[in-house]
Image (tube, helix red, strand yellow):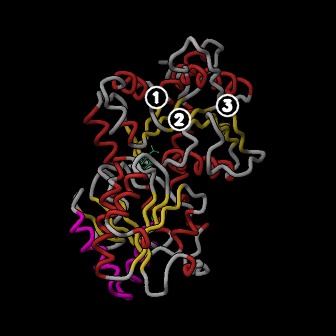
């Protein structure tokens, strides 16, 4: 099938999921066209089945805000016509579903009927989309999609609670390509990061407020009082500077490493023992899943879709949002004993394999087929 994928090309979870999905579809023989404003971060070399079309938004002084949606929908129309694309899959409702719908309507003028799949990722619903300024447009775009998918049961529930949704929402969880990870890989160069007796705790995110970065540091502060440990903070974002200041204030400077954005996430996770994800809300928690497949136990908040990924008492522990005492106590329960830690690490890996792409990709292919077959019916 010829598929156009629209996503954010950044380090964020939705961009990662869309890119990995596109790569996997291309490997299965589909022709995939990414349409976005920059080549997606995880998209390596383009090949015969993977194409990238850049959306340019010309700067024009008359516009206070440059109209990205307009440029995107025009680029979609051109690309879909030029490459005879059969299906459009947009990741993140704002503004992608909105622009996708406009493209769909414009294409109908040329007698082209293209089905649109919208995948909801979380912040497009729980944080940004529900804002009164966006809500009517988000509701409209979801209702006008041919198929709507959500990355967790929790996100589906929130979407139905927050919006007036007339369409069925199908849950297709995020995934991981298990075959890329060898459970026996041991050449992690752990010694570059910590001493033999130190546990390595990791956090990876875009350092937005919703990630509750101070909680990560406060949990670590409690852990390192009890056992030798290092904290590795990976990512960039608005809360990073304050986090560095908090570490200074707590006297943790020597024990916390801020690495910035990294394309070597797996190498970092490879030598990590525990992953901290204390988010305020999280529709899925892809970062936790990536940690788990690298045999890293997880201590997280029990919010949104996280409990669907991090199984309490098995792959790690859950705690209430903001309860840093409980998170630290649970982290120590895992970290204090070698045997317990080994068991949690193994369990984390086992749970993560349930999200193997081999189980998830056919679900997307199935809905693609269905949507394509009924493309003439849905001319709304
Ligand atoms: O977490 C972020 O800030 C990035 C955000 C995004 O939109 O890319 O991630 C969302 O989508 C990911 C992929 O489906 C999920 O794993 C994240 O849980 C979700 N983030 C939130 O719900 C806060």
The label on residue 90 is 2
Residue 260 among those drawn in magenta: no
In terms of image quadrants, where is residue 229? Answer: bottom left
Evaluate if marks 1 and 3 touch, with contact meaning CB atoms under 8 Å apart: no
The label on residue 145 is 1
Q: Identify which residue, 90 or 217, lies in the foreground.
A: 217
The label on residue 206 is none
The residue at label 1 has a CB less than 8 Å from ligand 1: no
- Position of residue 174 relative to residue 81, above or below, is below
Seen at 51% across and 17% down, the residue is 64
> Mark 1 Cα within 10 Å, few/some/many (few <14, many 20+)?
many
The label on residue 85 is 3
Q: Which residues are magenta?
A: 324-353
Mark 3–mark 2 Cα distance, whole angstroms, equals: 14 Å
Rendering coords of residue 79 (x, y %): 69, 27
* Sooner in the amino-acid sequence: mark 3 or mark 2: 3
Evaluate if marks 1 and 2 touch, with contact meaning CB atoms under 8 Å apart: yes
- Position of residue 74 relative to residue 203, above or below, is above
Mark 1–mark 2 Cα distance, whole angstroms, equals: 10 Å
Rendering coords of residue 4 (x, y %): 63, 35
């Amino acid at each position: 099938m010829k598929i156009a994928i629209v996503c954010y090309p950044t380090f964020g979870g939705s961009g990662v999921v869309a890119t990995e999905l596109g790569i996997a579809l291309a490997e299965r023989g589909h022709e995939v066209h990414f349409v976005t404003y920059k080549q997606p971060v995880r998209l390596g070399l383009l090949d015969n089945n993977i194409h990238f079309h850049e959306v340019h938004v010309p700067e024009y002084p008359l516009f206070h805000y440059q109209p990205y949606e307009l440029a995107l929908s025009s680029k979609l129309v051109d690309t879909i016509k030029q490459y005879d694309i059969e299906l459009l899959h947009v990741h993140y409702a704002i503004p992608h579903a909105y622009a996708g719908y406009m493209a769909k309507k414009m294409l109908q003028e040329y007698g082209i009927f293209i089905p649109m799949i919208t995948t909801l990722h979380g912040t497009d619903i729980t944080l940004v989309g529900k804002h009164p300024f966006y809500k009517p447009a988000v509701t409209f775009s979801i209702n006008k999609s041919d198929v709507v998918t959500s990355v967790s049961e929790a996100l589906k529930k929130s979407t139905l609670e927050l919006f007036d949704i007339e369409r069925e929402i199908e849950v297709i969880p995020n995934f991981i390509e298990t075959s890329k990870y060898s459970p026996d890989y041991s050449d992690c160069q752990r010694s570059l990061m910590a001493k033999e007796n130190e546990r390595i705790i990791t956090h990876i995110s875009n350092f937005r407020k919703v990630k509750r970065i101070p909680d990560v540091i406060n949990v670590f502060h409690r852990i390192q009082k009890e056992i030798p440990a290092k904290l590795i903070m990976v990512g960039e974002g608005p809360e990073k500077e304050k986090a560095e200041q908090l570490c200074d204030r707590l006297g943790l400077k020597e024990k916390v490493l801020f690495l910035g954005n990294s394309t070597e996430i797996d190498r970092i996770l490879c030598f990590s023992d525990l992953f901290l994800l204390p988010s305020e809300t999280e529709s899925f928690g892809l970062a936790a899943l990536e940690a788990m497949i690298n045999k890293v136990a997880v201590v997280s908040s029990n919010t949104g879709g996280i409990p669907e990924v991090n199984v309490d008492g098995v792959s790690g522990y859950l705690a209430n949002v903001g309860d840093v005492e409980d998170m630290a106590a649970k982290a120590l329960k895992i970290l204090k004993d070698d045997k317990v830690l080994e068991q949690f690490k193994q369990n984390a890996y086992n749970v993560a394999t349930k999200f193997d792409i081999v189980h998830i990709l056919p679900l997307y292919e199935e809905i693609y087929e269905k949507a394509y077959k009924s493309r003439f019916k849905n001319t709304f």
